[in-house]
Image (tube, rainbow, N blue to C red):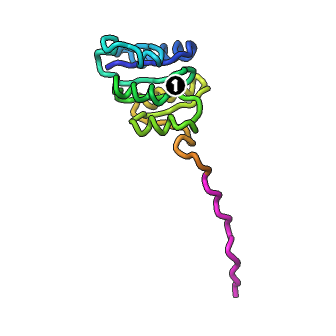
Amino acid sequence: MTTLLLAHNMMLRRGLLRHLREISSLTPVLTQTPEWLLDAPAAEMPSAPVDFALLDCSGTDADPQVLVDTLCARLAPRRWLILCEAPGSGVASYAARLGASGCLTVPATPEQARAAVELVRAGGQCFPRRAFSMTPAPAPSPIGSGGSTARG
């Protein structure tokens, strides 16, 4: 099995690469830019199945939905996490419909990124609260409304 890290942010890449190598000591960890998915010839794709992929859709000019589609079509990772700039963009819900295990909005702390990676790699899911709801939640009904009752 292979672990794949697709990101531009060098600090994120270095930190997560070190972390992934520590927790994935028996599997190869590959790193590329997100655009690599779009441009790489088939011969450059990992030969082993991809167990986990992290796709950073922030900081790229490529359409995030195209990146997500390409990740699924070319690599079909068993578990995958995306990083995106805003939960309201629809990328998180789109990725979830295609099988993503999680979405983390950036900027995120290194601790948040590591926790999301560990959760998804362990089989869990993490999505922003607002990833699936574009409308505000209805206001709670007031307690005790509707009149009073007389005791007697």
Residue span colored magenta: 137-152
Residue depicted at 56% across the width and 28% down the height:
112
Is 35 placed above or below 63 here? above
The percent coordinates of residue 58 (x first, y second) are: 56, 24
| Quadrant of the frame with the C terminus | bottom right
Name the main secondary structure of what is drawn in magenta. loop
| Quadrant of the frame with the N terminus | top left
Mark 1: which amino acid?
Cys
Residue depicted at 35% across the width and 16% down the height:
27
Residue depicted at 59% across the width and 49% down the height:
135
The percent coordinates of residue 29 (x first, y second) are: 40, 14
Residue nearest the observer in this picture, 136 or 107: 136
Is 152 placed above or below 18 here? below
Residue nearest the observer in this picture, 149 or 105: 105
Residue depicted at 57% across the width and 25% down the height:
111
The percent coordinates of residue 31 (x first, y second) are: 44, 13
The percent coordinates of residue 139 (x first, y second) are: 65, 57
Q: Number of numbered discs present?
A: 1
Q: Is residue 150 highlighted in magenta?
A: yes
Going by the image, does 69 lie left or right of 115? left
**Disc 1: which residue:** 57
